[in-house]
Amino acid sequence: ILWRIPRVVNTVLLPRLSGESDRRSAEITAKMNRVVFAVTLLCLVPFALTVEWFIPLLYGVEYQDAAQVILVLLPGVLAISVFKLLVPNLIIRGRAWTYSLSVLSSLIVMIILDMFMIPRYGILGAGIASSIAYTTACLVVLVTVVRMNDLPLRSYFDFFADLGELKRLRAGS
């Protein structure tokens, strides 16, 4: 469900960015990433704190081990939300090959980690491998977008700056 947040924003973001200058496109992408990152993080934290209680309640104690798998997947969920938000910026800037490279590198990481971790740790190993693979895809795209757009890394994650802006707007009205 948490992956739907960036997917919806992504659907709206791509056409919006295509009509903007490179600089404006970068600023919009950074701002939308901050918002979606904050919302996703705010949803993940309570979910992470309660998942070990909810799984047995909803599915029974025989599924209690699934809570650990979900917990190790959550960092990957956060990373993939960033990935999905940054991809439209790559596409409109003619860097679709970076998207392909990030997906391929993620796939290679997942296959290698699955080969070693699943036999040893079972489904938990698969969850860890997936989370690391999602993070790999995110990092490839994030490094490319930050370099390409010439905006500092913090501009993609500093949602406190947006809170300060909201305060200033409220004070002015």
Image (tube, rainbow, N blue to C red):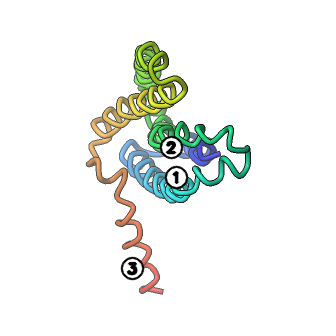
The residue labelled by disc 2 is 71
Residue 48 seen in the figure: yes
Residue 125, image x, y percentages:
47, 26
Query: Which residue has dot 1 on it?
Result: 48
The residue that appears at 60% across and 38% down in the rendered structure is 66
2 and 3 marks in contact (CB < 8 Å): no
Between 48 and 152, the residue placed more toward the observer is 48
Q: Residues within 10 Å of mark 3 (few under 14, many from 20)?
A: few
Q: Nearer the viewer, residue 119 or 31?
A: 119
Between tags 1 and 3, which lies in front?
1
Element at label 3: helix
Q: Is residue 83 left or right of residue 123?
A: left
Location of residue 125 with respect to 32 vertically, above or below = above
Residue that label 3 marks = 168
Q: Amino acid at mark 3?
A: Arg
Residue 22, position as x, y percentages in the image:
38, 42
Mark 1 secondary-structure assignment: helix
Crowding near the residue tagged with mark 2, few <14, some 14–19, many ≥20 C-alpha atoms within 10 Å: many
Q: Amino acid at mark 2?
A: Leu
Is 74 placed above or below 154 here? Answer: above
Q: Label 2 to label 3, Cα distance in Å?
A: 37 Å
The earlier-in-sequence mark between 1 and 3 is: 1
Q: Nearer the viewer, residue 54 or 38?
A: 54
